[in-house]
């Protein structure tokens, strides 16, 4: 379907590379604060703070915080940020999931690097996306990941906690969180900024009822960004533009997730790949989308014009 338009500790799972100057700055920040590196996990670092408490820090998020500023200030910037990490979750970690059931939330992200079984973060692959869902316990100023051990000791399977976390997400999501981002295209977005905007892609039928038959085109470039286009013949024409918006946004956001476009219907996710070739984009929709395409655009020519311009909403 065509539509117009040296090995280093920061190189690991997912192929991410980080400049040596960044890693040196991080080590210097650790030294200033009395932190100790335990293990490099490719895209994260396992460490202990000055009080001996364990933490796992995402390197990509730290790198994106310092990248806009002068490199000479990176150690200062990192030390200042790490010094502000809240104590609440480390001082009083939950002993049992059931005790914090109302605060369990679901997060979407990229697959995690392999971990020790004792501290392994529980995750579940999101079929059709290359992404994973994780569970966290939410605190006023931070969150902590739910581990495989915590799930096992709860007496419930992961599926139970996913459903509980998803229901909690529905409860905390304010009405009307999906707002118009671009009138001409019909693009909607959610940018509440509570760390769960991307996760709201899991509850779109609750947030925007009436689209169960055809579903939604969705992009989640980062943790705090959800872009949504209800499926229609008009939405098909602006898919290359949506992909461009997601790609450009994903490059610069902290807590990045994916530059890809997905089709979600009835809670099922499908990757909707677009191959850009000059002013054209070739789309290879999943087989499940064929009946939708026949319904919303029965007369779609092989290569229709793409009226969407470039740029972000």
Image (cartoon, grey):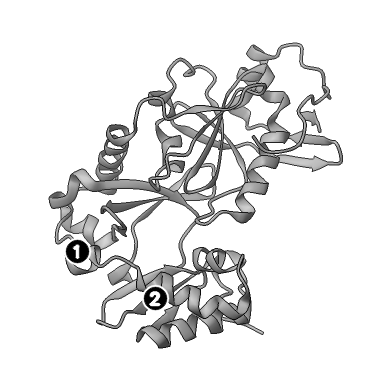
Q: Which residue is mark 2?
A: 46
Dot label at residue 79: none
Residue name at image x 76 percent, y 42 percent? 275
- The quadrant the N terminus occupies is top right
**Element type at mark 2:** strand
Q: Name the foreground residue: 175 vs 201.
A: 175
Residue 277, position in %: x, y? 84, 41
Dot label at residue 93: 1
Q: Name the foreground residue: 131 vs 250.
A: 250
Residue 108, position in %: x, y? 44, 48
Q: Name the foreground residue: 277 vs 247.
A: 247
Residue 156 horizontal side relative to residue 240, left or right: left
Residue 42, position in %: x, y? 52, 72
Residue 148 horizontal side relative to residue 112, left or right: left
Q: Say which label, 1 or 2, has the lower sequence index.
A: 2
Residue name at image x 56 percent, y 69 percent? 66
Q: Is residue 1 above or below residue 29?
A: above
Residue 63, position in %: x, y? 55, 68
């Amino acid at each position: 379907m065509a539509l117009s338009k040296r090995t280093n500790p920061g190189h690991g799972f997912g192929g991410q590379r980080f400049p040596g100057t960044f890693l040196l700055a991080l080590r210097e920040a650790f030294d200033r604060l009395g932190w100790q590196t335990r293990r490099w996990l490719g895209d994260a670092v396992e460490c202990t703070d000055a009080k001996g408490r364990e933490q796992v820090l995402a390197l990509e998020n730290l790198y994106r915080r310092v990248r806009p500023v002068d490199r000479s200030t990176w150690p200062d910037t990192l030390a200042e940020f790490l010094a502000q990490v809240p104590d609440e979750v480390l001082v009083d970690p939950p002993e049992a999931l059931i005790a914090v059931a109302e605060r369990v939330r679901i997060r979407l992200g990229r697959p995690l690097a392999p971990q020790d079984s004792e501290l392994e973060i529980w995750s579940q692959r999101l079929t059709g996306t290359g992404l994973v869902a994780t569970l966290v316990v939410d605190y006023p100023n931070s969150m902590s990941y739910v581990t495989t051990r915590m799930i096992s000791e709860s007496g419930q399977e992961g599926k139970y906690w996913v459903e509980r976390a998803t229901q909690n997400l529905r409860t905390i999501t304010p009405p009307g969180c999906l707002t118009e981002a671009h009138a001409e295209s019909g693009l909607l977005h959610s940018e509440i900024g509570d760390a769960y905007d991307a996760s709201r892609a899991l509850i779109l039928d609750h947030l925007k009822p009436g689209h169960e038959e055809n579903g939604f085109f969705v992009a989640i470039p980062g943790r705090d960004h959800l872009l949504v286009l209800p499926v229609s013949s008009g939405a098909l024409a602006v898919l290359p533009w949506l992909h461009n918006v997601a790609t450009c946004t994903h490059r610069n956001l902290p807590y990045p997730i994916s530059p890809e476009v997905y089709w979600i219907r009835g809670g099922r996710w499908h990757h909707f790949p677009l191959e850009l070739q000059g002013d054209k984009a070739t789309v290879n929709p999943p087989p499940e989308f064929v009946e939708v395409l026949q319904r919303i655009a029965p007369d779609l020519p092989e290569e229709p014009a793409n009226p969407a311009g470039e740029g972000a909403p």
